[in-house]
Image (cartoon, helix red, strand yellow):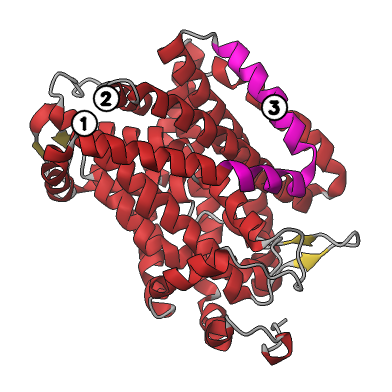
Amino acid sequence: MNILETIQSIVTSINDVLWGPPMLILLFGTHLFLTFRTGFIQKKILTAIKLSVTKDPDSEGDISQFGALTTALASTIGTGNIIGVGTAVAIGGPGAVLWCWLTGVFGIATKYAEALIAVKYRVKTKDGRMLGGAMYALERGLNMKWLAVLFALFATIASFGIGSMVQTNAIASVWKTNLNFPGWIVGVVCALLAAAVVFGGVKAISKVCEKLVPFMAIFYVIGCVIILGYNYDFIIPAIKTICVMAFRPGAAVGGLVGSGIMMAARYGIARGLFSNESGMGSAPIVAAAAQTRNPVRQALVSATGTFWDTVVVCAMTGLVLVSSIMKNPNIDVRNITDGGELTSLAFAQIPYVGKIILIVGIVSFAFSTILGWAYYGERCAEYLGGSKVLIPYRILYVASIAIAPLITLNLVWDLADAFNALMAIPNLIALLLLSKVIVKETKTYINDLDKKDMSEIPTVGK
C-alpha cells in the first residue's frame, strides 16, 4: 500500500506540471487558433452529420466513414462522459462543466484538423491496409521522425491506461457498488469478450462498434432526458451555477463548491480532452482507415465525434449531476473526490431508472472504449515495431483488462491523464506547424463535398 501511495504521489506531482497553465493554454489556444484558421469549421456541423451517414464506397480505405466514426466514438464516448464529468464536478466544482463543454465546442476544429492531416499523410501497406495518424503526419509532413516515435510510444502506453484499465476499472467499480459483484470476475469476463473482438482486427472492431455505439448513445441520452424531466425545476438554477462558478469560487445548493477559475478550467479541460480526445491525436488513427475521396470529407465526419461526445453527451451528464445534487441536498459532495461515487449518488436519486441507466451506460460506454483504443494502440505499436508486434500487443492489452480491477481507480485515472498530456503535445505541435496545409486542403475541397462524379474532385495532394 505504501508503494502505491508513493507512486500515486509521484504521478499526481507530474500531473500538476503537465496540466498546469502552459498545457491548458496550449490545448485551448490550439482549439481557438484552428477555429479561426479554418473559418469556423463548426458552422459545417450539419453537413458533417449528413456526410457521416453517407457511404463513399469507391474510395480507398479499409472501413466505411460511418465505421470509422463509430469506432472513434466508441473510444471517446466512454467513462469520461459519466465518471470523468463526475470527477471534474467533484474536484473542480460545477464550473468545470462549462469548461468541459467549451473544450468540445472549440475542439471540433481541432478534431477536424487532426483528422485532415491523418488522411492526407496516410500510407498504404503491402497488404493493402491504410495507416495514418499524428506519427505519419509528423514524419511525412514535417520530417520529424523523432517526435513521431515519441507520439507513437506515448499512445501505445496510453492505450493500456485510458483504453483498457480505466474502462475496466470503471465497469468493475459500478458492478461492485451497485450489485456487490467481485471485481476480478468482471476483469476476466471483460478480457474474454474483448479478446473475441480485438483479435479480429479493425474490421471486426468497426462492425461491433457500428451496432453498439448508436444503441448506447441513444439509450443514455434518453435516460438523461428522463432525469432532467424529473429535475425540471432545477435545470435553470443548475445552468446558472455552472456558468457562474466557472469563473469564481463560491457555494451553491447541495454542498456544491466552486473552486475558482484555475481548478474549474484544469479539470474541465482535462476531462474534456479525456472525453472527446480533441487534440490528443487518437481518433485520427482510425479516420485514416476510412473510405474517403478527400481529406476534408473524412475530417468533417470525424469532427462530429466531438460534437456528439462533448457538446451533447458530456453537457447532459454535467447538467444531470448538478441539477440532481441541487434537487437532493442530502447528497453531501463536500468530502467526495471520486467521480464514480458522485455519479452513482446522483443517479441513485432517480426512482427505478437511475441505477439501470448508470450501470448500462458505464458498461456499454466503457467496453466500446476498450475496443476503440485497442485499435489505436496496435497501430502505434505497429509504427514502432512493425506488424510482428501486433499479436504480442493484443495479448498484453487483453491481460491488462483482466488485472485492471485490482488497481486503485485514482492511480489509473492519474496515469491516464499524464499520458493523455504527453500524447497531446507532439500532436498539437503537428497541428500548429501544418496549419497552412490544413487551410489549403480545406479551401481545395470544402466546396466539392457533395459531388458524385469523382473526376470533378481535385486530386489529393501528396
Q: CA distance from mark 1 to mark 3?
A: 34 Å
> Which of label 2 and label 3 is nearer to you?
2
Going by the numbered disc 1, the residue's amino acid type is Ser
Q: Earlier in the sequence, mark 2 or mark 3?
A: 3
Secondary structure beneath label 3: helix
Q: Which residue is mark 3?
A: 193
Q: Is residue 2 above or below residue 372?
A: above
Cα separation, mark 1 vs mark 2, equals 8 Å
Q: Nearer the viewer, residue 93 or 178?
A: 178
> Is any part of residue 146 visible from this angle?
yes
The residue that label 2 is drawn on is 350
Residue 108's place in the image compared with 444, above or below, is: above
Comparing 325 with 164, the one in front is: 325
Left or right: residue 433 versus residue 119 is left
Q: Nearer the viewer, residue 265 or 455?
A: 455
Task: Rate crowding at label 3 as few (under 14), some (14 to 19) or many (20 or more) other CA atoms within 10 Å.
Answer: few
- Considering the whole magenta stretch, tell me its main secondary structure: helix
Per the rendered image, the range of residues in magenta is 183-212
Residue 160 sits in quarter: top right
